[in-house]
Amino acid sequence: MLTIFLILLLYCARWIKTSVFLGVFFNFFYFSLLPFQKYSTIIGILSMILKISMFYI
């Protein structure tokens, strides 16, 4: 499930090519999921991976 989500996000990132949109998108999800500690850390890790991968796209 998470891998499919990440692949879809990377596919969208290829077309968008703006880290600003993805940063806002991930910050929105991160703050909306803050009460759920498990999910917020998963989203945080995913956002870090995506921010790193944005340099290679």
Image (tube, helix red, strand yellow):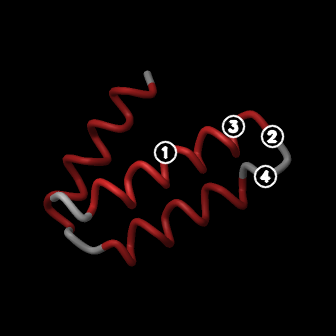
Give the quarter of the figure containing the C terminus.
Answer: bottom left
On screen, residue 9 above or below 54: above
Task: Tell me the distance, in whole angstroms, between the alpha carbons under discs 4 and 3.
Answer: 8 Å
Residue 13, image x and y in percent? 24, 58
> What residue is pinned by disc 4?
34
Q: In the image, 1: left or right of 55? A: right
Secondary structure, mark 1, is helix
Task: Tell me the distance, in whole angstroms, between the alpha carbons under discs 2 and 3.
Answer: 6 Å
> What residue is pinned by disc 2?
36
On screen, residue 37 above or below 17: above
Disc with the residue nearer the chain's start (4 vs 3): 4
Task: Tell me the distance, in whole angstroms, between the alpha carbons under discs 2 and 1.
Answer: 15 Å
Disc with the residue nearer the chain's start (4 vs 1): 4
Mark 3 residue type = Tyr
Secondary structure, mark 2, is loop
Disc 4 residue crowd, few under 14, some 14–19, many 20+, Cα 10 Å: few
Residue 54, image x and y in percent? 27, 61
In front: mark 4 or mark 1? Answer: 1
Secondary structure, mark 3, is helix
Choose top left, top right, bottom left or bottom right for residue 31. Answer: bottom right
Q: In the image, 41: left or right of 57? A: right
Residue 15 shows which numbered tag? none
Residue 9, image x and y in percent? 32, 47
Q: In the image, 43: left or right of 8? A: right
Task: Tell me the distance, in whole angstroms, between the alpha carbons under discs 2 and 4.
Answer: 5 Å
Q: In the image, 36: left or right of 3? A: right
Disc with the residue nearer the chain's start (3 vs 1): 3
Mark 1 residue type = Leu
Residue 39 shows which numbered tag? 3
The reply to whether dot 2 and dot 4 touch (C-beta < 8 Å) is yes
> What residue is pinned by disc 1?
46
